[in-house]
Image (tube, helix red, strand yellow):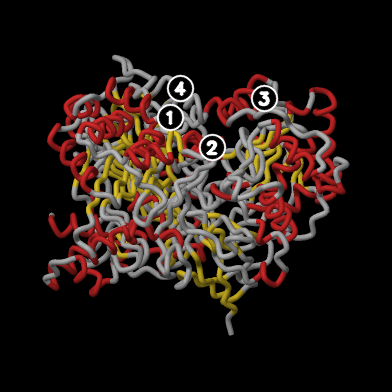
Amino acid sequence: MTDSVTTTCAYCGVGCGIQAEIIDAKARKVKISGQSDHPANFGRLCSKGISLGDTLGLEGRLLHPEINGQRVSWEQALDEVATRLQQIIADHGPESVAMYLSGQLLTEDYYIANKLMKGFIGSANVDTNSRLCMSSSVAGHKRAFGSDTVPGCYEDLELADLIILTGSNTAWCHPIVFQRIKAAKKQRPTLKVVVIDPRQTATCEIADIHLPLKSGSDDWLFSGLLAYLARMDSIDYEYLEASTEGFGATLKKAKATTPTIMDAARECGLKENDVANFYDLYRKTSKTVTVYSQGINQSSSGTDKVNAIINCHLATGRIGQPGMGPFSLTGQPNAMGGREVGGLANQLAAHMDFSAEDIDRVQRFWQAPNIVDKPGLKAVDLFDSVASGKIRAIWIMGTNPAVSMPDARKIHEALSRCDTVIVSDCIQHTDTTDYANILLPATGWGEKEGTVTNSERCISRQRRLLPSAGEARHDWQIIRDVAIRMGFAGAFDFSSSHAIFKEHAALSGFENSRDARLRDFDISALANISSSDFDTFEPVSWPISSSKPKGMTRLFSDGIFYTPSGKARLVPVEPQNLQTKLSEAFPLVLNTGRIRDQWHTMTRTGLAPQLNQHIAEPYCEVHPKDAALFGLQDQDLASITSSQGEMIARVQISSELQPGNLFIPMHWTAQLSGSGRVGPLVNAITDPVSGQPESKHTPVSVGPFPAQWHGFAYSRRELQVEGIDYWVKIKGKHFYRYELANTAPIRDYSDWCKQLIRADQSIASPEEQWLEYYDQGAGKYRAACYLGDQLISCLFIGPDCQLPDRSWLSQLFNTDSLTQQDRMSLLAGVPMNANAGGGKTICACFAVGESTIRKAISNEQLSTVEAIGDHLNAGTNCGSCIPELQKILAG
């Protein structure tokens, strides 16, 4: 008999509901499916969500507290944290300590961390990795609305007549939202979709118009749109007069910078006719939703870009009504929850600011002796202060800034210099935990209890599926116990996440009044929620107050906002050419982002074998013209360099991005790749309002990587590959695969190979059998190691990247006994069976490879994506692979 638990997904800000069947808690076996009645996903899950059950094992988990690499008791660890913090504060003041939090934390974890730092330690140097993904949206909301309010909901996507997707590869990064849009368009073909992105991504599959604008020029496009709407007399002046202010100055600026369609098209690098069609479609379509994400936010002018979008909605009155409004898609599962409790350094809890009134209000509610009176340092500045020694202790929770922060080399230097680095994490070895003086094992997804808030303000419960791994504790418990040791016991007498949630809810309603429009965030109706009601809590969108006990899906329908005047503000925007200029040394623009099946720094998704097969290596997408100009070959390796650092990545030549641009995904770490991290390249320029880094525009150069040899290895155990210039570790079902390349030649192939395969085993097993092939003239070497009939490892080396297909070799590790034919084919580097190997994985949900798909198309005469789905299931779950299926059909 199985237990069934509803919870929420661990990944993006869509906030999908999950139905988890606990098959065997002791063995940590859980079957994951979508929760059919959750308002975010209605039963759908993407490839990452459906694979969560494969990430719940103990592999790589941090199971016990450590001090300086030595296992200690919790009492010792907590005492050490409290003592170090107290001593540093006594010697250098409260601003010498900092916390760096994560959108992976639950709201209750976030709340208690901010209470400790901002109310009791007296330092506002507490920021979050959400600074890197949505702080420009927060700043834009506050400038326009007087509050950090997402006005709409997912249902608006189904009610709109025009959806604009800008700065968002929604198909890959928010797949379930994309599927809702796609389903709505199929049901109602009159729904138009405009995609605004320098790249032609999978999201363009449903686009009626794709505008491949110049990198970073979005503010020019939307300023031009505002000027156009005024010129065409398509402004809602009645709404402007009743509900807004600042229109005159805003329009004057728009007319001065982009007076005509031709001006906007020139600045954006677009065809004038394409811009005209987009502007005309916007003008004629009242039910318009503009969905935006990191491509807007991650900019040195990200806040202005957000306000340029909002300006157009306010000028036309398209906000707060069904099917209308600007809509920010957040990147992380609880970025919104972090915003609610003051997770950013420039916020106080419950959407309060550092005004004298709000500081006094929070201090009285918390009875906080050391309430902060000014904002703290934002992420980039915070780590700069760690590097300079102004911050002597930093506590990092549930995130990996040594990978995810821009100019990552500087982050490594900062952490290496810091007196005290405390890391709470569920993973033992990350690029960040390597610098920790104190490691604290935290519970991971599937073990945590509390709440999260998604992109549409919907609060959902996250529920425990499994017991805590090893000695892991909840983040809120760890923070509470440190707070008690620091002398703050009375304010941190929490026995459960339920108790913290109640205080959080009570603060949201403290001296708040919806009628007076004091604060948008109000969940005070839940302040006295019982333990049983908290256990059975159903998803609901805030505000949740006495007047709105069932929540609200849309805000601002009455045209009243949270500014002193009650009117929304249009903000004059001065479109900017991006701060970091291209040069002869660095002539190309680097854009970073996500791939379909991986998440952040892969500490979780990297554990799921099926998620590692679609895109297995760091890659650099380059236009054919640039590939020819810089001497790059498809599937070869390239060196990419910026003024900050360098990396190596696999070349993918593609006409789906513009000449002069490169795209590289962000996910790989030093744990998974040698020289494959993009973080060291990215410049640390930030938006002056939001502090969000400009991760989409770094000047770089590119050239061939001068490898003397290329290779790959398979092994049933992990190998030690340090010392090789380029390597990538890929976890399979029964093996680890390593892609390899090096500039130094191999002198003795056989000896080198055996040392690599045996890893740290200095003595060969007496049962070990080796088969080897070496063509000295061609520079080709192959070897396989067996124990009995079982293949243990194999290695292939050649002078270039033209090496055997990997997919059929993967299958040889699924059996305990190889046939003689298998052995011969392995050494030959070619499968004897023409049907062996499914090829590169296209559909991760059902593990369907490209070769399998092509054979089915040929043998079964399949001509549609639906036919492929009927025959192979590919594309029938999350649908993220459908654009690739269409390309295969077209090819």
Q: Quadrant of residue 727?
A: top left
Residue at mark 1 to residue at mark 4: CA–CA distance = 14 Å
* 508, 427: nearer the viewer: 508
Q: Secondary structure at mark 4?
A: loop
Question: Which numbered disc covers residue 417?
Answer: 3
Q: Label 2, on which residue?
A: 563
Decide which of tag 1 and tag 2 comes sooner along the chain: 2
At 88% from the left edge and 41% from the top edge, which residue is drawn?
487
The three-letter amino acid code for the residue at tag 3 is: Arg
Label 2 crowding class (10 Å Cα cut-off): few <14, some 14-19, many 20+? some
Residue 329 percent coordinates (x, y) = 43, 48
Tag on residue 694?
A: 1
Q: Which residue is mark 4?
A: 644
Taking the image as shown, residue 689 lies to the left or right of residue 707, namely right
- Quick one: 440 or 454, which is closer to the camera? 454
Mark 3 / mark 2, whichever is N-terminal = 3
Outermost residue on the top side: it is 584
